[in-house]
Image (cartoon, grey):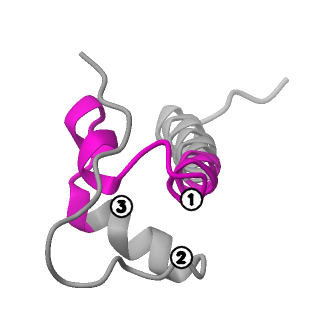
Amino acid sequence: MTRENPIDAAIQRYQEAKAALDQAKEAFFDTCAQEVLAGRETPDTIAARGPLSAVTIRKALRDRGVDPLPRGRKPNATSHP
Protein backbone atom coordinates (compact mmCIF):
# COMPACT_ATOMS: atom_id res chain seq x y z
CA MET A 1 0.00 0.00 0.00
CA THR A 2 1.55 3.31 -1.05
CA ARG A 3 0.82 6.55 0.69
CA GLU A 4 0.34 9.63 -1.48
CA ASN A 5 2.64 12.54 -0.77
CA PRO A 6 0.61 15.39 0.83
CA ILE A 7 2.23 17.98 -1.44
CA ASP A 8 1.39 15.97 -4.56
CA ALA A 9 -2.19 15.62 -3.33
CA ALA A 10 -2.43 19.37 -2.67
CA ILE A 11 -1.03 20.15 -6.12
CA GLN A 12 -3.59 17.81 -7.69
CA ARG A 13 -6.47 19.48 -5.81
CA TYR A 14 -5.20 22.93 -6.80
CA GLN A 15 -4.94 21.97 -10.47
CA GLU A 16 -8.44 20.51 -10.44
CA ALA A 17 -9.84 23.65 -8.76
CA LYS A 18 -8.04 25.90 -11.27
CA ALA A 19 -9.44 23.90 -14.20
CA ALA A 20 -12.95 24.17 -12.74
CA LEU A 21 -12.52 27.93 -12.25
CA ASP A 22 -11.28 28.39 -15.82
CA GLN A 23 -14.26 26.44 -17.11
CA ALA A 24 -16.69 28.50 -15.00
CA LYS A 25 -15.13 31.78 -16.21
CA GLU A 26 -15.54 30.73 -19.85
CA ALA A 27 -19.19 29.86 -19.24
CA PHE A 28 -19.67 33.19 -17.42
CA PHE A 29 -18.18 35.17 -20.31
CA ASP A 30 -20.26 33.24 -22.86
CA THR A 31 -23.40 34.13 -20.89
CA CYS A 32 -22.27 37.77 -20.64
CA ALA A 33 -21.82 37.90 -24.42
CA GLN A 34 -25.33 36.52 -25.00
CA GLU A 35 -26.90 39.03 -22.61
CA VAL A 36 -24.98 42.02 -24.01
CA LEU A 37 -25.83 41.06 -27.59
CA ALA A 38 -29.50 40.75 -26.61
CA GLY A 39 -29.37 44.25 -25.11
CA ARG A 40 -30.33 43.10 -21.63
CA GLU A 41 -26.99 43.90 -19.99
CA THR A 42 -23.89 46.04 -20.37
CA PRO A 43 -20.40 45.28 -19.11
CA ASP A 44 -20.96 47.91 -16.42
CA THR A 45 -24.20 46.37 -15.12
CA ILE A 46 -22.59 42.92 -15.06
CA ALA A 47 -19.46 44.21 -13.29
CA ALA A 48 -21.56 45.96 -10.64
CA ARG A 49 -22.97 42.59 -9.58
CA GLY A 50 -19.97 40.34 -10.05
CA PRO A 51 -16.34 39.87 -9.06
CA LEU A 52 -14.80 41.08 -12.34
CA SER A 53 -14.24 44.60 -13.60
CA ALA A 54 -16.06 46.07 -16.60
CA VAL A 55 -12.69 46.30 -18.39
CA THR A 56 -12.12 42.55 -17.95
CA ILE A 57 -15.63 41.80 -19.14
CA ARG A 58 -15.30 44.10 -22.17
CA LYS A 59 -12.05 42.38 -23.19
CA ALA A 60 -13.64 38.94 -22.88
CA LEU A 61 -16.60 40.15 -24.96
CA ARG A 62 -14.29 41.48 -27.69
CA ASP A 63 -12.50 38.11 -27.68
CA ARG A 64 -15.90 36.56 -28.39
CA GLY A 65 -16.57 38.91 -31.31
CA VAL A 66 -18.85 41.39 -29.53
CA ASP A 67 -18.17 44.84 -30.95
CA PRO A 68 -17.79 47.69 -28.47
CA LEU A 69 -20.47 50.35 -28.45
CA PRO A 70 -19.57 53.54 -30.31
CA ARG A 71 -18.22 56.46 -28.31
CA GLY A 72 -20.73 58.76 -26.64
CA ARG A 73 -23.80 58.11 -24.56
CA LYS A 74 -24.54 54.47 -24.00
CA PRO A 75 -28.06 53.07 -24.00
CA ASN A 76 -29.32 51.90 -20.62
CA ALA A 77 -29.65 48.18 -20.20
CA THR A 78 -32.11 46.73 -17.75
CA SER A 79 -30.95 47.90 -14.35
CA HIS A 80 -30.74 45.49 -11.45
CA PRO A 81 -30.91 46.59 -7.82
x and y percentages locating residue 38 in the rendered image:
60, 52
Q: As drawn, is 61 to the left or to the right of 64?
A: left
Mark 2 surroundings: few (<14), some (14-19) or many (≥20) residues within 10 A: some
**Amino acid under disc 2:** Val
Judging by the rendered image, the residue that carries numbered circle 3 is 57
x and y percentages locating residue 41 in the rendered image:
42, 45
The answer for how far apart the CA atoms under marks 2 and 3 are is 11 Å
Mark 1 surroundings: few (<14), some (14-19) or many (≥20) residues within 10 A: many
Q: Which mark is residue 33?
A: 1
Q: Quadrant of the N terminus?
A: top right
x and y percentages locating residue 66 in the rendered image:
53, 76
Q: As drawn, is 65 to the left or to the right of 69?
A: right
Mark closer to the observer (2, 3)? 2
**Amino acid under disc 1:** Ala
- Indicate the quadrant where residue 70 lies: bottom left
Q: Which mark is residue 5?
A: none
Q: Which residues are magenta?
A: 26-55
Q: Which mark is residue 66?
A: 2
